[in-house]
Amino acid sequence: MKEIVLKIQDFLKEAEKPLVVILGPTASGKTALSVELAKEFNGEIVSADSRQIYRGLDISTAKISKKEQGGVPHHLIDVADPDEVFTLADYQEKAFETIDDILRRGKTPFLVGGTGLYISAITENYQIPKTPQSKGIRLKIEKELEEKGAENLYERLKKLDPEAVAAFSPNNHRYLIRALEIVESTKKTKTELAKKGRKLYDALKFGIYWSREKLYERIDRRTLQQIESGLIEEVQNLVDKYSPPLPAMTSIGCKEVIPFLEGKVSKEELIEKLQQNNRNYAKRQLTWFRRDPEINWVSDEQLRT
Protein backbone atom coordinates (compact mmCIF):
# COMPACT_ATOMS: atom_id res chain seq x y z
CA MET A 1 0.00 0.00 0.00
CA LYS A 2 2.84 2.39 0.85
CA GLU A 3 4.34 1.80 -2.61
CA ILE A 4 1.06 2.77 -4.30
CA VAL A 5 0.75 5.93 -2.19
CA LEU A 6 4.31 6.98 -3.05
CA LYS A 7 3.75 6.39 -6.76
CA ILE A 8 0.59 8.49 -6.73
CA GLN A 9 2.34 11.28 -4.81
CA ASP A 10 5.12 11.44 -7.42
CA PHE A 11 2.62 11.18 -10.27
CA LEU A 12 0.48 14.07 -9.01
CA LYS A 13 3.53 16.33 -8.83
CA GLU A 14 4.19 15.90 -12.56
CA ALA A 15 0.85 15.22 -14.25
CA GLU A 16 -1.00 18.12 -15.88
CA LYS A 17 -4.37 16.34 -16.06
CA PRO A 18 -4.04 13.38 -13.68
CA LEU A 19 -6.31 10.36 -13.71
CA VAL A 20 -5.66 7.48 -11.31
CA VAL A 21 -7.11 4.19 -12.54
CA ILE A 22 -7.90 1.29 -10.19
CA LEU A 23 -8.88 -1.86 -12.07
CA GLY A 24 -9.03 -5.61 -11.69
CA PRO A 25 -11.32 -8.61 -11.97
CA THR A 26 -14.58 -8.97 -10.09
CA ALA A 27 -14.23 -9.44 -6.31
CA SER A 28 -10.59 -8.31 -6.32
CA GLY A 29 -11.06 -5.47 -3.83
CA LYS A 30 -11.12 -2.44 -6.13
CA THR A 31 -13.86 -0.70 -4.15
CA ALA A 32 -12.14 -0.71 -0.75
CA LEU A 33 -8.77 0.30 -2.20
CA SER A 34 -10.19 3.15 -4.26
CA VAL A 35 -12.07 4.65 -1.31
CA GLU A 36 -8.95 4.52 0.86
CA LEU A 37 -6.83 6.18 -1.84
CA ALA A 38 -9.47 8.78 -2.67
CA LYS A 39 -9.55 9.83 0.98
CA GLU A 40 -5.75 10.08 0.97
CA PHE A 41 -5.58 12.24 -2.15
CA ASN A 42 -8.73 14.41 -1.95
CA GLY A 43 -10.30 12.35 -4.71
CA GLU A 44 -13.63 11.51 -6.24
CA ILE A 45 -14.48 8.19 -7.86
CA VAL A 46 -15.83 7.69 -11.37
CA SER A 47 -17.25 4.20 -11.82
CA ALA A 48 -16.13 2.15 -14.82
CA ASP A 49 -18.62 -0.67 -14.35
CA SER A 50 -21.04 -1.36 -17.18
CA ARG A 51 -23.56 -2.96 -14.81
CA GLN A 52 -23.56 -0.46 -11.96
CA ILE A 53 -24.90 2.26 -14.26
CA TYR A 54 -28.36 0.68 -13.83
CA ARG A 55 -30.69 1.57 -10.98
CA GLY A 56 -32.12 -1.28 -8.96
CA LEU A 57 -29.25 -3.68 -9.56
CA ASP A 58 -27.56 -3.19 -6.21
CA ILE A 59 -26.86 -6.66 -4.88
CA SER A 60 -26.32 -8.31 -8.26
CA THR A 61 -23.61 -5.81 -9.22
CA ALA A 62 -22.05 -5.56 -5.73
CA LYS A 63 -22.77 -1.83 -5.86
CA ILE A 64 -21.03 0.22 -3.19
CA SER A 65 -23.31 1.40 -0.38
CA LYS A 66 -23.41 4.93 1.01
CA LYS A 67 -21.74 3.67 4.17
CA GLU A 68 -18.93 2.02 2.20
CA GLN A 69 -18.38 5.23 0.22
CA GLY A 70 -17.20 6.83 3.44
CA GLY A 71 -18.09 10.32 2.29
CA VAL A 72 -16.14 10.03 -0.97
CA PRO A 73 -18.26 11.27 -3.93
CA HIS A 74 -19.03 8.53 -6.47
CA HIS A 75 -20.13 9.20 -10.05
CA LEU A 76 -21.76 7.25 -12.92
CA ILE A 77 -23.57 4.86 -10.62
CA ASP A 78 -27.38 4.61 -11.00
CA VAL A 79 -27.56 6.80 -14.11
CA ALA A 80 -29.96 4.67 -16.19
CA ASP A 81 -33.12 2.64 -15.67
CA PRO A 82 -32.97 -1.11 -16.42
CA ASP A 83 -35.05 -0.71 -19.58
CA GLU A 84 -32.78 2.00 -21.02
CA VAL A 85 -30.08 1.40 -23.62
CA PHE A 86 -26.89 3.04 -22.35
CA THR A 87 -24.15 2.85 -24.96
CA LEU A 88 -20.38 3.08 -24.73
CA ALA A 89 -20.62 6.51 -26.34
CA ASP A 90 -23.10 7.59 -23.64
CA TYR A 91 -20.73 6.41 -20.94
CA GLN A 92 -17.69 8.06 -22.50
CA GLU A 93 -19.45 11.42 -22.84
CA LYS A 94 -20.61 11.44 -19.21
CA ALA A 95 -17.26 10.20 -17.92
CA PHE A 96 -15.32 12.93 -19.75
CA GLU A 97 -17.66 15.60 -18.37
CA THR A 98 -17.35 14.22 -14.84
CA ILE A 99 -13.56 13.85 -14.86
CA ASP A 100 -13.11 17.37 -16.26
CA ASP A 101 -15.39 18.76 -13.56
CA ILE A 102 -13.42 16.98 -10.81
CA LEU A 103 -10.16 18.39 -12.17
CA ARG A 104 -11.61 21.90 -12.42
CA ARG A 105 -12.47 21.75 -8.73
CA GLY A 106 -8.89 20.87 -7.86
CA LYS A 107 -9.60 17.30 -6.83
CA THR A 108 -8.13 13.99 -8.00
CA PRO A 109 -10.28 11.79 -10.27
CA PHE A 110 -10.12 8.04 -9.72
CA LEU A 111 -11.49 5.84 -12.53
CA VAL A 112 -12.46 2.58 -10.85
CA GLY A 113 -13.97 -0.61 -12.23
CA GLY A 114 -13.65 -3.85 -14.08
CA THR A 115 -15.13 -3.08 -17.48
CA GLY A 116 -12.04 -2.95 -19.67
CA LEU A 117 -13.81 -1.41 -22.64
CA TYR A 118 -15.06 1.49 -20.51
CA ILE A 119 -11.61 2.13 -19.06
CA SER A 120 -9.94 2.00 -22.48
CA ALA A 121 -12.57 4.34 -23.96
CA ILE A 122 -11.51 6.96 -21.43
CA THR A 123 -7.75 6.45 -21.11
CA GLU A 124 -7.23 5.90 -24.86
CA ASN A 125 -9.88 8.43 -25.94
CA TYR A 126 -11.66 6.08 -28.33
CA GLN A 127 -13.19 7.91 -31.27
CA ILE A 128 -16.50 6.09 -31.13
CA PRO A 129 -18.34 6.26 -34.45
CA LYS A 130 -22.01 7.02 -34.72
CA THR A 131 -22.82 3.92 -36.74
CA PRO A 132 -26.42 3.83 -37.96
CA GLN A 133 -28.69 1.02 -36.88
CA SER A 134 -30.06 -1.27 -39.57
CA LYS A 135 -33.41 -2.75 -38.65
CA GLY A 136 -33.23 -5.37 -41.40
CA ILE A 137 -29.78 -6.60 -40.40
CA ARG A 138 -30.69 -6.53 -36.72
CA LEU A 139 -33.81 -8.62 -37.30
CA LYS A 140 -31.77 -11.13 -39.29
CA ILE A 141 -29.21 -11.46 -36.49
CA GLU A 142 -31.94 -11.72 -33.85
CA LYS A 143 -33.53 -14.55 -35.85
CA GLU A 144 -30.16 -16.28 -36.08
CA LEU A 145 -29.79 -15.90 -32.31
CA GLU A 146 -33.18 -17.50 -31.75
CA GLU A 147 -32.52 -20.38 -34.15
CA LYS A 148 -28.84 -21.13 -33.53
CA GLY A 149 -28.16 -19.72 -30.08
CA ALA A 150 -25.79 -17.15 -28.62
CA GLU A 151 -22.72 -19.39 -28.73
CA ASN A 152 -22.98 -19.62 -32.52
CA LEU A 153 -23.07 -15.83 -32.89
CA TYR A 154 -20.29 -15.45 -30.33
CA GLU A 155 -17.99 -17.80 -32.23
CA ARG A 156 -18.73 -15.96 -35.48
CA LEU A 157 -17.91 -12.62 -33.90
CA LYS A 158 -14.75 -14.06 -32.34
CA LYS A 159 -13.42 -14.78 -35.84
CA LEU A 160 -14.45 -11.35 -37.14
CA ASP A 161 -13.48 -9.18 -34.17
CA PRO A 162 -11.56 -11.06 -31.43
CA GLU A 163 -10.92 -7.85 -29.48
CA ALA A 164 -14.61 -7.06 -29.21
CA VAL A 165 -15.57 -10.44 -27.74
CA ALA A 166 -13.06 -9.99 -24.91
CA ALA A 167 -15.31 -7.27 -23.52
CA PHE A 168 -18.47 -9.31 -22.93
CA SER A 169 -19.88 -12.82 -22.53
CA PRO A 170 -21.94 -14.85 -25.04
CA ASN A 171 -24.99 -14.19 -22.87
CA ASN A 172 -24.84 -10.44 -23.38
CA HIS A 173 -27.13 -10.61 -26.39
CA ARG A 174 -27.47 -6.85 -26.82
CA TYR A 175 -23.74 -6.23 -27.25
CA LEU A 176 -23.36 -9.37 -29.35
CA ILE A 177 -26.11 -8.36 -31.79
CA ARG A 178 -24.85 -4.78 -32.00
CA ALA A 179 -21.25 -5.82 -32.72
CA LEU A 180 -22.36 -8.12 -35.54
CA GLU A 181 -24.74 -5.47 -36.87
CA ILE A 182 -21.83 -3.04 -37.13
CA VAL A 183 -19.71 -5.56 -39.04
CA GLU A 184 -22.47 -6.39 -41.49
CA SER A 185 -23.59 -2.81 -42.09
CA THR A 186 -20.16 -1.10 -42.32
CA LYS A 187 -17.91 -4.00 -43.41
CA LYS A 188 -15.63 -2.96 -40.56
CA THR A 189 -15.36 -4.33 -37.03
CA LYS A 190 -16.32 -2.41 -33.93
CA THR A 191 -12.65 -2.43 -32.94
CA GLU A 192 -11.54 -0.99 -36.29
CA LEU A 193 -14.09 1.81 -36.04
CA ALA A 194 -13.21 2.70 -32.45
CA LYS A 195 -9.92 4.41 -33.24
CA LYS A 196 -7.80 5.96 -30.52
CA GLY A 197 -7.54 9.73 -30.37
CA ARG A 198 -5.10 12.00 -28.59
CA LYS A 199 -5.08 11.06 -24.92
CA LEU A 200 -6.91 13.59 -22.80
CA TYR A 201 -5.46 12.63 -19.43
CA ASP A 202 -2.23 11.51 -17.82
CA ALA A 203 -3.25 8.11 -16.50
CA LEU A 204 -1.60 6.11 -13.74
CA LYS A 205 -3.03 2.60 -13.73
CA PHE A 206 -3.04 0.07 -10.92
CA GLY A 207 -4.37 -3.46 -11.30
CA ILE A 208 -5.13 -5.73 -8.35
CA TYR A 209 -3.76 -9.25 -8.72
CA TRP A 210 -4.71 -12.39 -6.80
CA SER A 211 -3.68 -15.98 -7.36
CA ARG A 212 -6.40 -17.84 -9.24
CA GLU A 213 -7.20 -19.99 -6.22
CA LYS A 214 -7.63 -17.02 -3.88
CA LEU A 215 -9.62 -15.02 -6.43
CA TYR A 216 -12.02 -17.89 -7.03
CA GLU A 217 -12.49 -18.33 -3.29
CA ARG A 218 -13.39 -14.64 -3.00
CA ILE A 219 -15.82 -14.90 -5.93
CA ASP A 220 -17.54 -17.98 -4.52
CA ARG A 221 -17.81 -16.43 -1.06
CA ARG A 222 -19.25 -13.19 -2.40
CA THR A 223 -21.82 -15.09 -4.44
CA LEU A 224 -23.11 -16.76 -1.29
CA GLN A 225 -23.21 -13.38 0.47
CA GLN A 226 -25.25 -11.93 -2.41
CA ILE A 227 -27.82 -14.73 -2.09
CA GLU A 228 -28.03 -14.18 1.67
CA SER A 229 -28.38 -10.40 1.16
CA GLY A 230 -31.46 -10.76 -1.04
CA LEU A 231 -30.26 -11.22 -4.62
CA ILE A 232 -33.21 -13.42 -5.55
CA GLU A 233 -35.69 -10.91 -4.16
CA GLU A 234 -33.94 -8.05 -5.98
CA VAL A 235 -34.26 -9.80 -9.35
CA GLN A 236 -37.88 -10.75 -8.60
CA ASN A 237 -38.66 -7.06 -8.04
CA LEU A 238 -37.06 -6.18 -11.37
CA VAL A 239 -38.98 -8.91 -13.19
CA ASP A 240 -42.23 -7.69 -11.62
CA LYS A 241 -41.53 -4.10 -12.65
CA TYR A 242 -40.02 -4.66 -16.09
CA SER A 243 -40.45 -7.24 -18.82
CA PRO A 244 -37.25 -9.13 -19.64
CA PRO A 245 -35.22 -9.33 -21.74
CA LEU A 246 -33.76 -5.92 -20.99
CA PRO A 247 -30.23 -4.53 -21.36
CA ALA A 248 -29.66 -4.63 -17.60
CA MET A 249 -31.13 -8.11 -17.17
CA THR A 250 -28.44 -9.75 -19.29
CA SER A 251 -25.81 -9.05 -16.63
CA ILE A 252 -24.40 -11.70 -14.32
CA GLY A 253 -26.52 -11.94 -11.21
CA CYS A 254 -29.79 -11.33 -13.07
CA LYS A 255 -29.77 -13.74 -15.98
CA GLU A 256 -28.97 -16.71 -13.72
CA VAL A 257 -31.71 -15.92 -11.20
CA ILE A 258 -34.53 -15.66 -13.75
CA PRO A 259 -34.53 -19.42 -14.59
CA PHE A 260 -34.66 -20.11 -10.83
CA LEU A 261 -37.69 -17.84 -10.48
CA GLU A 262 -39.30 -19.73 -13.35
CA GLY A 263 -38.73 -23.04 -11.55
CA LYS A 264 -36.29 -24.33 -14.16
CA VAL A 265 -33.29 -24.78 -11.83
CA SER A 266 -32.77 -25.51 -8.15
CA LYS A 267 -31.18 -23.10 -5.69
CA GLU A 268 -28.04 -25.24 -5.63
CA GLU A 269 -27.85 -25.11 -9.43
CA LEU A 270 -28.39 -21.36 -9.33
CA ILE A 271 -25.49 -20.83 -6.91
CA GLU A 272 -23.20 -23.10 -8.92
CA LYS A 273 -24.06 -21.27 -12.15
CA LEU A 274 -23.53 -17.85 -10.57
CA GLN A 275 -20.15 -18.82 -9.20
CA GLN A 276 -19.04 -20.35 -12.49
CA ASN A 277 -20.18 -17.38 -14.57
CA ASN A 278 -18.43 -14.94 -12.25
CA ARG A 279 -15.22 -16.97 -12.48
CA ASN A 280 -15.48 -16.98 -16.27
CA TYR A 281 -16.09 -13.23 -16.23
CA ALA A 282 -12.96 -12.72 -14.15
CA LYS A 283 -10.97 -14.67 -16.75
CA ARG A 284 -12.24 -12.43 -19.54
CA GLN A 285 -11.47 -9.31 -17.54
CA LEU A 286 -7.88 -10.44 -16.94
CA THR A 287 -7.46 -11.33 -20.61
CA TRP A 288 -8.41 -7.76 -21.53
CA PHE A 289 -6.24 -6.10 -18.88
CA ARG A 290 -3.13 -8.15 -19.53
CA ARG A 291 -2.78 -6.58 -22.96
CA ASP A 292 -2.08 -3.21 -21.37
CA PRO A 293 1.63 -2.70 -20.52
CA GLU A 294 0.85 0.52 -18.62
CA ILE A 295 -0.84 -1.29 -15.73
CA ASN A 296 1.11 -1.47 -12.46
CA TRP A 297 0.05 -4.81 -11.00
CA VAL A 298 -0.13 -5.06 -7.22
CA SER A 299 -0.71 -8.28 -5.30
CA ASP A 300 -2.94 -8.75 -2.31
CA GLU A 301 0.22 -9.05 -0.18
CA GLN A 302 1.45 -5.63 -1.37
CA LEU A 303 -1.87 -4.06 -0.44
CA ARG A 304 -1.36 -5.11 3.16
CA THR A 305 2.08 -3.50 3.50
Image: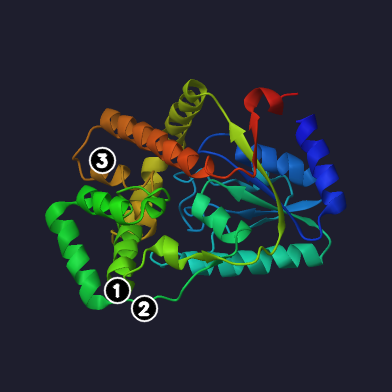
- The location of residue 175, given as percent across then percent down, is 36, 59
The answer to which image quadrant residue 8 occupies is top right
Q: Residue at x 31, y 50 (%)?
A: 158
Quick one: label 2, few (<14), some, or many (20+) residues within 10 Å? few
Q: Nearer the viewer, mark 1 or mark 2?
A: 1
Q: Secondary structure at mark 1?
A: helix
Q: Residue 86, image x and y in percent? A: 45, 66
Taking the image as shown, residue 88 lies to the left or right of residue 258, namely: right
Q: Residue at x 40, y 75 (%)?
A: 131
Question: Can the viewer see residue 268 in this picture?
Answer: yes
**What's the CA distance linking mark 2 and mark 3?**
37 Å
Q: Residues within 10 Å of mark 3 (few under 14, many from 20)?
A: some
In terms of sequence position, does the residue under pointer 2 or pointer 3 come before the other?
2
Q: Where does residue 9 sit, x and y in percent of width and height?
A: 84, 43
The kind of residue on which mark 3 rests is Phe
Three-letter residue code for mark 2: Pro
Closer to viewer: mark 2 or mark 3: 2
Tell me which numbered mark, 1 or 2, is placed earlier along the sequence. Answer: 2
Real-space Cα separation, disc 1 to disc 2, in angstroms: 8 Å
Which label number is shown at residue 222? none
**Of tags 3 and 1, which is closer to the observer?**
1
